[in-house]
Image (cartoon, rainbow, N blue to C red):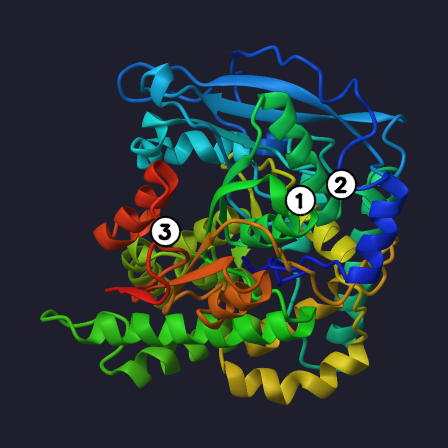
Amino acid sequence: MPTQSQPRTTAVAATAALLVATLAACGGSDSKDEALPDQKLSWKDCPAPSAAEGGGGAPSPLPGGAEWQCATMKAPLDWADPKGDTIDIALIRAETSGDDDDRIGSLVFNFGGPGGSGVTTLPAFGSDYAKLRTRYDLVSFDPRGVGRSAGIKCEDDEQLDEYFQQDSTPDDDAEKKKLVENVKSFNGACEKNSGKTLPHVRTTDAARDMDLMRQVLGDDKLHYFGISYGTELGGVYAHLFPKKVGRAVFDAVVDPTQTAEEGSLGQAKGFQLALDNFAKDCTSKVTDCPVGDTEQDVKDKIAKLLKDLDSKPITGLPPRELTQTAATNGIAQSLYSKDFWPYLTQGLEEAYDGDGKILMALSDSMNGRSEDGEYSNIQAANVSINCADDKARYTREYVEQKLPGFREASPLFGDYLAWGMVGCTDWAVEGQADHPNVGAEGAPPIVVIGNTGDPATPYEGARKMAQALGKGVGVELTYKGQGHGAYDSKNACVRDAVNGYLLDGTVPKAGTVCG
């Protein structure tokens, strides 16, 4: 998801040289600390999510009455010093609904971000994975830096309200200077409030946590379902621990060959494609499209709305107004799923009449703001993980040079995503690499699913991931659909292929296309 400070949520980095150095520091791919792999988890009824996890009530039982259980795992703060200080990693599980004789093990999920809380997300979508639960315990976690797992803290709720209202597409020198100052202030708050943790939230650290988790859960292999950024995390895990990979699926796949800039430019193209598809869908219906007469008219009217909001915001969710930034953010959020398109249509229609509540609610959802004004730490974690992973540090001047290319990629989202690249410029921790090493020679097949209409992780990334994993490892599957990801689209072809592999070990034919 795009964010005000670091729009590219698909960033993760690890070069071969850096990984070799890290492995040497850790004594190879296995933890040297015998106490941590031998720890026993104390599973209990789950509490209500913390504010950092997004708040709300305790997870409801699954169909059939099965309760969610939560536990805490100890992991090293610094994997280069595995006998040093530890942090807590929050876990959640639903035990298998099948017979013990049919149980394969645990199926670990990461839903992306980076910065998303798996402890809150898995229960929200638990019923979608009921079939998989027949042979697996469903397990997810808050990665380090997220939610209850040593969650990164940056600015407070009041400061974040102001931060997310800032002009993220500056037009003149004063606005550009203000944006850079705001980002510097946000980054400084992260260092002040979480400086001890910031160097240790890289994706390589999270991958090592997952291997410790595998051991603590009692599994010989890590069976894994990664979505969006979770595919990068899975790829890095497969590189570090190829012989420990079990049955794995990557959905909404990140291109591991891209730099942060290339990822942002790819998202500009992806979100523009999704907007084009929305406009086509709206204007092709039997009833009139309420936000434009033709595809181009829809896009022209949205562009005019955003231009008008730049100088004159409208009523949002009082006392906050809908600014150009909030509206752009809300539109982007609605493009993550075709199910959200009706909300986008209604939100645009109302915004044309001066009412910005729906678009602002969509923007709040992306930013992790609850109705009571509390923010989760999803954006703080997102920036922290991306900046720890990505080596690149882009200046204002560099972004200005690149703006024409971003605008060509997307007239609507180009400026927004280009200026997001300054998010790591003043970061306190050096970035690890330009892009990750996900080469996983010796690993078993990993199913890699690309969605042709995906805005956030463009379709081409699936093929790049399959190639980078290595011959005989990456098995590409295509879904001709809309939205972010494929399995949760409920497409029968996709689900049959994924379920067949995870449950029965049947590898789908490479190049399979699901319509």
Mark positioned earlier in the residue sequence (3 or 1): 1
Q: Which residue is mark 1?
A: 241
At a point 67% along the width and 42% down the height, the residue shown is 207
Residue 49 seen: no
Q: Which residue type carries mark 1?
A: Phe
The quadrant in which residue 352 appears is bottom left
Q: Crowding at label 2, few (<14), some or many (≥20) Cα neighbours within 10 Å?
A: some
Residue under pointer 2: 29
Residue type indicated by callout 2: Ser
Q: Position of residue 47 (x, y in %)?
A: 54, 16
**Mark 1 and mark 2 residues within 8 Å of each other at the beta carbon:** yes
User: Would residue 20 appear left or right of 459 to someone viewing this image?
Assistant: right
- Local secondary structure at mark 2: loop
Residue 199 point in image, percent of width and height? 84, 45
What whole-number distance in Å separates the C-alpha atoms at marks 3 and 1? 21 Å
Picture coordinates of residue 51, whole percent (x, y): 61, 29
| Residue underneath mark 3 | 507
Disc 3 secondary structure class: loop
Question: In this orientation, does residue 425 appear?
Answer: yes
Q: CA distance from mark 1 to mark 2?
A: 7 Å
Q: Nearer the viewer, residue 388 or 96?
A: 96
Q: Amino acid at mark 3?
A: Val
